[in-house]
Image (cartoon, grey):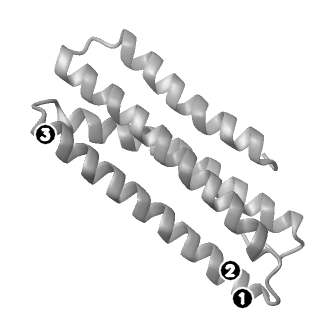
Amino acid sequence: MSGLVPAVAVSLGAGALGAAVLLVAPLEGQARTGALLGVAASSLVGLTALLLKAWLTRGLMKAPKEVQALRGLLQMQGLSLGLRVVGVGVGALVLRLAGLDAVAFVLAFFVVYLVQQVVEVRYVLAAQRAAGLKVSR
């Protein structure tokens, strides 16, 4: 997965698969609604994080030193995590206030997040390799 388009496709595909599973899962109304909103929110935040990483990665790979590029990549990862923490927190609070199942929201959010995290890390590592930076395993 070396390009942005396949990464975006897999990331959005995870959300679509999550929504499809939830539509056939034996869930009650509030739980299903909360879980579907969790999948949608995670997909939106994940897409935003991936596009942000793609944008920042292009500039970081031009950094004069590998240490600066690595520091930037770690900051990017922290920013991505911060986006998700805010997204899940705000979403859970809104659902709680609306009387919907916030637990289903949070669980669905993080199931999709797990897949997206793998996609994002693979994308960033591929971008590093493409820029000629050493990637340790």
Which residue appears at 35% of the width and 26% of the height? 36
Q: Please tell me whether mark 3 sits on a helix, a strand or a loop.
A: helix
In the rendered structure, find residue 96 and report the number of the disc placed on it: 3
Name the kind of residue labelled 2 in the image. Leu
Q: Quadrant of residue 124?
A: bottom right
Q: Amino acid at mark 3?
A: Arg
Question: Is 18 placed above or below 2 here?
Answer: above
Q: Where is residue 86 shown, x and y percent of the image? A: 33, 58
> How far, Cα to Cα, is label 2 from label 3?
39 Å
Provide residue 94's location: percent of width, then percent of height: 19, 42
> Which residue is tagged 1?
67
Please identify, in this view, whether the residue under mark 2 or under mark 3 is nearer the observer: 3
Q: Which residue is mark 2?
A: 70
Question: Mark 2 or 3 closer to N-term?
Answer: 2
**Label 1 vs label 3: CA separation?**
43 Å
Query: Hey, which quadrant is residue 135 in on the image?
Result: bottom right
Q: CA distance from mark 1 to mark 2?
A: 5 Å
* 133 left or right, relative to 16: right
